[in-house]
């Protein structure tokens, strides 16, 4: 069965969102919403794979929802919801826990990074995290997933799970008349100049909400003055900007700022260097700050407005969850029949 194109992606409700989340994920979600039917999910089940304060978790879920809407995602045309509201995610994740192999998950680099040295003390959920992500995607038979570079390995695992499921149950699937398998081979969509936005304090580290230095990131809730100040304080080197891409090699901080500029201006790094090559950072940084403020200020204003209207945000999630469940329900029912569950 050829699968109809459908987009799924998720953002974790942990801490506040920053420029990396905006350029690497949310803005790209907006860009896809007119070409495909899309589901954009606040993945609260994933969030609790590490401890979350309950009050903060609820707040962060509304925060991500507000960011989706403020960035321009149309929750009527597409679906915005939170993962815990649609039980198909957890149910399918259990089935995938029984499809995926220990060896596959042992190779996941994100688990190794997140668990750190104390693996014995990591939650079982953190280890099984990629199976839940596969369930998120395949519960909707999603064909395309816009994600950052760091999620590529999880998408490969999603395909491995889909393939093994289709293969293991091939006979049963054929009996039921599904000769092409139940799950698509989902493609990641990784593109754009700043899918990896780095820390403003260290060009070798990803911009992250867990960085102790708030100056390392631009938060979506930062006001114009704060944004300008953080750009001004960003770590750089004493050289002027090169005129060509090659000149950014070995200059991670310069490379990062040029990448951010290009992404914000929706152009390429080459084009930015063609315009600003030869400039000192004392001139480039104010231009970058102005650009960042002009792009982020409207999002920021709209987010604040939405965050004041909790009832509206909850209604959006409620509506989205019902529509998501209506898609996942019949797919999960098929999966259960294939597996041999009675009822
Ligand atoms: N793991 C993703 C991240 O940390 C979030 C996520 C969960 C996701 N489920 C997903 C992304 C499904 C894409 C599709 O960024």
Image (cartoon, rainbow, N blue to C red):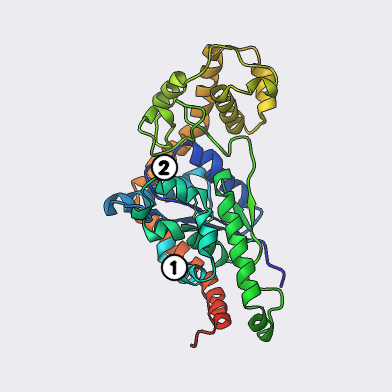
Camera-nearest residue between 230 and 224: 230
Which secondary structure, mark 2?
helix
User: What crowding class fits label 1: few (fewer than 14 Cα within 10 Å), some (14-19), or many (20 or more)?
Assistant: some
User: What crowding class fits label 2: few (fewer than 14 Cα within 10 Å), some (14-19), or many (20 or more)?
Assistant: many
Against 279, is 156 above or below?
below
Q: Quadrant of the N terminus?
A: bottom right
Mark 1 lies on residue = 90
Q: Earlier in the sequence, mark 1 or mark 2?
A: 1
Mark 2 lies on residue = 303
Camera-nearest residue between 160 and 343: 160
Against 41, is 304 above or below?
above
The answer to which quarter of the image holds residue 312 is bottom left
Mark 2 close to ligand 1, CB under 8 Å: no
Task: Answer with left or right where residue 82 lies relative to residue 8.
Answer: left
Give residue 288's position: percent from left, percent from top.
54, 23
Q: Can see residue 123?
A: yes
């Amino acid at each position: 069965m050829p699968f109809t194109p459908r987009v799924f992606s998720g953002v974790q409700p942990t801490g506040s969102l920053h420029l990396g989340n905006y350029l690497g994920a949310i803005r790209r979600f907006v860009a896809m919403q007119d070409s495909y039917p899309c589901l954009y999910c606040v993945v609260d089940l994933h969030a609790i794979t590490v401890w979350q304060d309950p009050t903060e978790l609820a707040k962060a879920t509304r925060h991500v929802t507000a960011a989706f809407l403020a960035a321009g995602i149309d929750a009527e045309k597409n679906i915005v919801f939170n993962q815990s509201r649609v039980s198909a995610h957890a149910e399918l994740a259990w089935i995938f826990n029984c499809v995926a192999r220990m060896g596959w998950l042992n190779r996941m680099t994100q688990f190794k990074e997140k668990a750190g040295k104390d693996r014995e003390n990591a939650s079982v959920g953190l280890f099984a995290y990629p199976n839940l992500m596969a369930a998120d995607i395949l519960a909707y038979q999603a064909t395309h997933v816009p994600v950052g570079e760091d999620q590529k390995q999880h998408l490969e695992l999603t395909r491995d799970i889909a393939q093994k499921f289709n293969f293991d149950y091939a006979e049963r699937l054929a009996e039921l008349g599904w000769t092409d398998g139940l799950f698509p081979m989902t493609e990641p969509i990784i593109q754009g100049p700043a899918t990896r936005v780095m820390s403003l304090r260290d060009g070798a580290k990803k911009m992250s909400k867990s960085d102790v230095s708030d100056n390392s990131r631009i938060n979506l809730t930062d006001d114009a003055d704060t944004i300008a100040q953080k750009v001004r304080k960003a770590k750089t080197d004493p050289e002027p900007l090169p005129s060509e891409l090659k000149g950014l090699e070995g200059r991670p901080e310069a490379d990062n700022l040029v990448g951010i500029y290009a992404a914000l201006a929706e152009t390429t790094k080459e084009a930015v260097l063609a315009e600003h090559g030869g400039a000192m950072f004392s001139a480039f940084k104010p231009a970058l700050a102005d650009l960042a403020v002009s792009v982020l200020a409207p999002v920021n204003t709209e987010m604040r407005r939405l965050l004041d209207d909790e009832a509206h945000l909850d209604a959006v999630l409620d509506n989205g969850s019902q529509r998501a469940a209506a898609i996942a329900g019949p797919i999960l029912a098929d999966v259960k029949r294939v597996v041999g569950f009675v009822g």
